[in-house]
Structures are given as C-alpha cells and as structure tokens.
Image: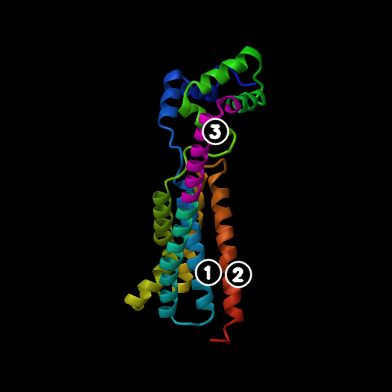
C-alpha cells in the first residue's frame, strides 16, 4: 500500500483538487483527433511503401514508382478521408435520430421513460430514496434526461468527432506522412545521382517513420514508447514484405 507522502500519491492528489477537477472536466477534449492522425499516417505510409516495394522488386523504373505512389497518396488518401467522413457522419446522424426519438417518447409517455431511467440506475446499484432522488433529478431537466437515455440506453457518445475535421486530419496525415517512402525516388528523379540507391533509402526512411508514429501513439496509450515503436515498425514491415514477395512473383509478367 502506498505511503501518504509517496510522490505518486502527491501528484495524484494535486490533480484531484476541486479546482483541478472542475478545470479538467470543463476543458475535456471530448473526441480526439489522435486516432484519425495515427490511422491516416500509418495507412498512408504502409500502402505507399507497399507500392514502392512491389514496383521496385518488379524491376520497374523510378518514374513508375513515383507515378503509382503519388496516385496512391491522392486517390487512396481521399478514399480514406471520405470513408472516415461518412462513418463519423453516420454516427452523428444516429445520435441525432436517437435524440429525436427520445424527445418524442418523453413527450408521449413520460412515466414509461422515467421507469427506464429508474431501471438503468437500479442496475448500477441505486435503491430506495437515493434511486428516486436520482430519477427525479435527471428527469427534471429535459436535456439531461435525453442525454442520459442516449448514453445509457443507446450506448452512444455525446462527444463524437466532427466529420469534416476527422476527414481532413486523416487525409493530411495520409499524404504528409505517406509521401516519405517516395522522397528518395523524387530526389533521384529531379536531381539525378543524389541517391544512388533510392529503394534502400526508402526502406530506412520508412522504417524511421513507422517507429516515430509508434512513439507518438505511445504518448496516448499505456504502452512503453519503444514497444509501441517496434510494434508499428513490425506491422509496417510485414505489409512491405508481402508487397515485395508479390512483386517478385510477378516480376516476369512486366
């Protein structure tokens, strides 16, 4: 058991004063853009390097690597952004529909909706006068009542991501981070001789990006930075290896 003067306990106590809690709840970020950034960055880098690996192993020119890589960045990046937009928009629309339905049900049959609130909190361990006080408090405010039903009955979040922002972050991360595997090929194309072995440089740059994205991810999850970096590096390397093998198998076709 931790001692009262333990540094960890002291730090925890400092972040749980009434003022600190009030500030944290007031400034809670709600939906986070971290997932959209990491998702776009990893997928952009993996798919672009997979194309680079497959085309390079097939023995095609640097020009073809660049054309296919850039086409993937724009096309697949936009496709991912559109998919993320439609998915988050659908979640938002479902939440709006659930709100409309709950408001209608409360208007038509409030006692039935009160009973739903009662059973929800009874399942959480409330009983007797305490339970009735909770029910009365929640149902006294229509907005709070509806929000409670959306969270507890429908299992939906009230702080979902904004569709346009989610799409923009995904696309930006996909393009900006996903272009790294092409950097050496672009440099070699515009400045011949700048990279004697562009594919080797692409491997090194891509590995560094995979690891860096994993390190960034580790800041937001309970995982050591080096393990997170190695995990991302391993997954990205697996995708690249698969593309390399396929490129080798198809080398005689082109």
Question: Residue at the spot x=59%, y=26% of the render?
Answer: 117
Q: Is residue 129 magenta?
A: no
| Residue 12 showing in the rendered view | yes
Q: Residue 191 location in percent, x, y?
A: 32, 76
Q: Is residue 68 left or right of residue 130?
A: left
Question: Residue at the spot x=44%, y=58% of the render?
Answer: 81
SS type, badge 1:
helix
State if disc 2 and disc 1 touch (CB < 8 Å): yes
Question: Residue at the spot x=42%, y=69% of the render?
Answer: 182
Say above or below: 135 vs 221: above
Check disc 2 and report the residue beneath it: 242
SS type, badge 2:
helix
Q: Nearer the viewer, mark 3 or mark 2?
A: 3
> Would you identify the image quadrant in which residue 27 lies?
top left
Whichever of labels 3 and 1 marks the residue nearer the N terminus, that label is: 1
Residue 50: give its label. Answer: 1
SS type, badge 3:
helix
Residue 183: give its label. Answer: none
Q: Rounded to the nearest whole Å, what is the CA distance between mark 1 and mark 2?
A: 8 Å
Residue 105: give its label. Answer: 3
Which region is colored magenta?
Answer: 89-113
């Amino acid at each position: 058991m931790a001692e009262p003067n333990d540094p960890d306990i002291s730090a925890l106590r400092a972040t749980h004063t009434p003022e600190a809690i009030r500030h944290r709840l007031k400034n809670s970020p709600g939906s986070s853009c971290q997932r959209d950034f990491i998702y776009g960055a990893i997928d952009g880098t993996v798919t672009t390097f997979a194309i680079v690996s497959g085309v390079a192993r097939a023995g095609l020119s640097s020009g073809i690597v660049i054309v296919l890589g850039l086409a993937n960045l724009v096309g697949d990046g936009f496709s991912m952004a559109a998919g993320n937009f439609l998915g988050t928009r659908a979640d938002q629309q479902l939440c709006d529909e659930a709100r409309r339905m709950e408001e209608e049900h409360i208007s038509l049959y409030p006692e039935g909706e009160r009973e739903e609130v009662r059973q929800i909190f009874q399942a959480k361990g409330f009983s007797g006068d305490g339970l009735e006080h909770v029910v009365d408090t929640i149902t006294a405010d229509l907005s709070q009542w509806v929000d409670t039903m959306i969270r507890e009955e429908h299992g939906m979040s009230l702080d979902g991501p904004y569709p346009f922002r989610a799409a923009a972050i995904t696309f930006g991360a996909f393009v900006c981070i996903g272009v790294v595997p092409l950097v050496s090929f672009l440099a070699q194309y515009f400045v011949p001789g700048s990279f004697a072995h562009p594919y080797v440089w692409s491997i090194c740059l891509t590995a560094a990006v995979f690891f860096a994205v994993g390190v960034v991810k580790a800041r937001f999850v309970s995982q050591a930075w080096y393990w997170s970096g190695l995990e991302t590096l391993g997954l990205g390397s697996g995708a690249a290896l698969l593309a390399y093998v396929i490129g080798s198998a198809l080398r005689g076709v082109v």
